[in-house]
Image (cartoon, rainbow, N blue to C red):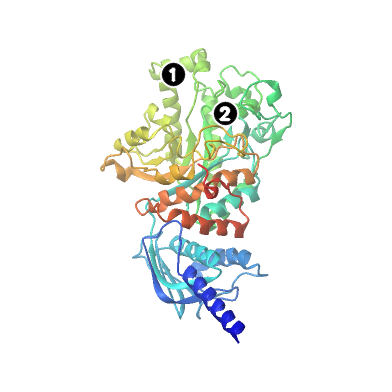
Amino acid sequence: MRLYSTFVAMFMALMCAVTVSARELNILPEPLSVNVEAEGNYTVTAKTKIVALEELNNPAARFAEEMMLYFGAKKPMSIAKRGKGITLNIDKNIHAEGYEMRVNGEGINIVGGSEAGVYYALQTLRQIIVTNDSVVPYCAIKDEPAFEYRGAHLDVSRHFMSVEEVKEYIDILAAHKLNRLHWHITDDQGWRIEIKAYPELTEKGSSRKETLIGHGAEPKWWDGTPHGGYYTQEEIREVVKYAEQHYITIIPEIEMPGHSQAALHALPWLGCHEQDVDVWTMWGVTPEVLCAGKETTYTFLENVLSEVVELFPSELIHIGGDECPKERWKVCEHCQAMMKAQGLEHEEQLQGYLVTRIEKFLNSKGRRIIGWDEILEGGVTTTATVMAWRGAKIGAYAAEHGHEVVMTPLPICYFDFYQTESREGEGLRIGGHINFEKIYAWDPFDGISEQARKNIIGVQCNLWSEYLKNISMVEGQLLPRLGAMCEVQWSVDRRNEATIRQKMESMRKFYDAYGWNYAPYYFDGRK
């Protein structure tokens, strides 16, 4: 009898512990408000019905697929037009990306301001289900994002990622409520997008002979292994559609006039002196750039961009514009003749001429340019969006002069940097040190006047892949630091240092459930 009583007491204590744990909703990023009732839970299973009108079939289907993976079920959760379970609706009086969620004995009722708002509510619900062992406490949640642009960058030029790997990257971004993927698909080390007007770009420009694997320039630091890959236009469309289904807009980047050595290898006539150059096997900045003095260069860029805008619906098209040496232009008869014809006094103005021509061309296609902050040096119009990467002061300057600005400054937004001071166990990385805590404490509005803040449309983290050879390494650099960044992006004024570690311990369970690689350093207390 005593043994039975002891067993009952232990069982009741365990149940109480589970109940208490289930009442803690460690939602990331932080919602506007969360009110958890003292008692009552709703348990979600693979047989729970999703009730949605046809207009919400996509967010419902995405959630059903995501939960099928978690439950290990043979088929997704069923979607019906009526009944009880997880009910989805739209109310356009709510912020377009916002939502309200109510959980009680009748089920889970979600109302979003749009399809996207419903989808973000379902991401919150998925997080609760996974981290609370399918138990959802009776609660009321209201939420909406702080920034309209919540981005992450992926460089597939330095190291190519397959279609499936890019899709997995999109999955991770969507789970953290990001809505922009800046896809860096051309650079010195590889041209990754099929352009039908110039098949040589992928036939010749998508592969390099070998890859630099150290921080030096001696032959012993190259791996001696060819590296390449590119996306057909059909594959591009597939990835774009997949992203759209997850409410992520892909912004393609076609680098110009610098970072173009892969294109110059494929089409030597794009250069000032038409010399043969290899697809670059080093990192950094090469002097080989597009000739800004030949009309054939502008024809090439317009033809490429004409195909790009057919593939990518994004209003913003990224044209790079960064790190363009001018040595070749200074001794190029074509560039000097163009400068004279346009009344330009120095080569920086010649880059500005190229950028403004491309801006006008894309405007004629109903698109707008976005570029790294060097585009400010060329006199672009205020319709151009600026990515402030060389420091917050440049972002402040651009915002104060009427440009929409995405804050992505060095070093805080560069996720290719080391994550610990000691660097122990991290492998070779590009340099620098940015840990979770630094990202979480960052204020993207620092130094920006109240008047200019309205032009800061968002925040982005960048992942350059010089030393990231596969998606597992990319994920290890992204996670868990994306947990800090998504709170800056979604809930910048709602962050709470007292609760973030508890949230991330919950997210660790979430990452494990979906098999995503993450770095252990934050969880181990290393900085």
Image point 53% across, 33% down: which residue? 255
Q: Which mark is residue 126?
A: none
Percent across and percent down for residue 527 are 50, 41
Task: Give the residue at the far left of this rendering.
Answer: 451
Tell me: 129 left or right of 71.
Answer: left
For label 2, the SS is loop
Outermost residue on the front side: it is 2
Q: Position of residue 38 (x, y in %)?
A: 40, 75
In the image, residue 390 sits, relative to residue 81, either above or below, namely above
The residue type indicated by label 2 comes to Ser
Q: Residues within 10 Å of mark 1 (few under 14, many from 20)?
A: some
CA distance for labels 1 and 2: 18 Å
The residue carrying mark 2 is 260
Mark before the other along the chain sequence, 1 or 2 = 2
Foreground pick, 8 / 114: 8
Left or right: 162, with 135 as reference point: right
The location of residue 276, given as percent across then percent down, is 66, 20
Image quadrant occupied by the N terminus = bottom right
Return the residue nearer the eye: 92 or 29: 29
